[in-house]
Image (cartoon, grey):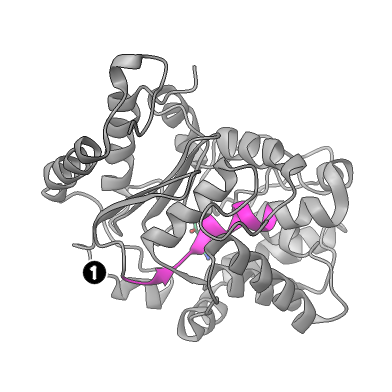
Amino acid sequence: DDFLSGEDPQMARSVSELQAFLADVHQRHACLREGAVATYIPELAKANPDWFGICIATTDGRVFEIGDTQPNFTVQSISKVFVHGLALEDHGRDVLLSRVGVEPTGDAFNAIVLDEASKRPYNPMVNAGAIATTSLIKGADPTERLNRLLAMFRNYMGHEVVIDVASYISERATGDRNRAMAYLMRHFGMLQSEVEESLDLYFQQCAVMVNCRDLAVMAATLANRGINPMTGDRAVHARYIRDILSVMSSCGMYNFAGEWGYKVGLPAKSGVCGGIIAVVPDQIGIAVFSPPLDERGNSVRGVKVFETISQAFGLHLF
Ligand code: DON
């Protein structure tokens, strides 16, 4: 009953060994006390810095978890991966590329910067690019666009989706930096809908409630070429998995993407909630949740746990 066989057959792990391994990794990283919970969105400041969960979901529908995999939190930037997929389905690769680039910025996730020549935001994983991507979601009116987005998240999660209204309102009330970015993009004709409408949908997608287990299943759905391994429902067309994972690889960890690629070597996405997901194509989705963040906005324990897991299982793609 092997769990994973990477490059090295020696790395194959039995299920009980894996459970013991996860418990050990959890225990060894729980004592890490660095980092700080995000406070720029007032609701995020309420997160418990001790929360710490690790979950692995396999493409054949098994789940391994340890620690705080049940508490709910808002998905924040991790939503960008999935909305990127929906925008690809709505418009196709070429149209999307003409609106939002695929270049890593090397800047912070909230940098106010557009490509000088094309006026496109750099990529769909940074705030500017995500707002532009969200503005491309099709629908007759804001309600239909929101409902399409929620249906998409439901397919990835395998259950009903709830938006945390307090977080949504909290971000809408304080999100002037994103608002400034949206106005700048609108000035250059790079925003598909009205500023407040685009921002509303973006703040709503960031306030979708998930837990660590949901995130692992969502990542496993990407690993499984778009089909949720728990429900068998399709969440995204298989033809766009390559695009989604490529952009995660180069841009998912912001200005840490290079070092992450060097050390962990998996397509990934982080959020200021303290979650990080990573995808091992055709094998597993991994999620770690721990709210204290480093200065780049990535979960401190999350980064360390992924370095450990990637090394232990030989998961680096190269
Ligand atoms: O737009 C924002 O600032 C948040 N709703 C999401 C940011 C985020 O998660 C970036 N992650 N590191």
User: Whole-percent x and y of residue 251?
Assistant: 58, 38
Left or right: 30, with 210 as reference point: left
Crowding at mark 1 (Cα within 10 Å: few <14, some 14-19, many 20+) = few
**Residues in magenta?**
71-84
User: Is residue 115 at least partly visible in the picture?
Assistant: no
Q: Nearer the viewer, residue 22 or 164?
A: 22
Q: Is residue 187 above or below residue 168?
A: above
- Give the residue number, with chain letter if any, for mark 1: 48
Q: How many marks?
A: 1
Residue at left offset 23%, top offset 63%: 51
Q: Residue at x 31, y 71 (%)?
A: 71
Q: Amino acid at mark 1?
A: Asn
| Some atom of ligand 1 lies within 8 Å of the CB belonging to the residue at label 1 | no
Q: Nearer the viewer, residue 257 or 140?
A: 140
Residue located 24% across and 38% down the image: 18
Q: Is residue 2 above or below residue 225?
A: above
Residue 137: give x, y in percent of width and height.
Answer: 79, 64
Magenta stretch holds residue 76: yes
Q: Is residue 135 magenta?
A: no
Residue at figure coordinates x 83%, y 70% from the top left: 193
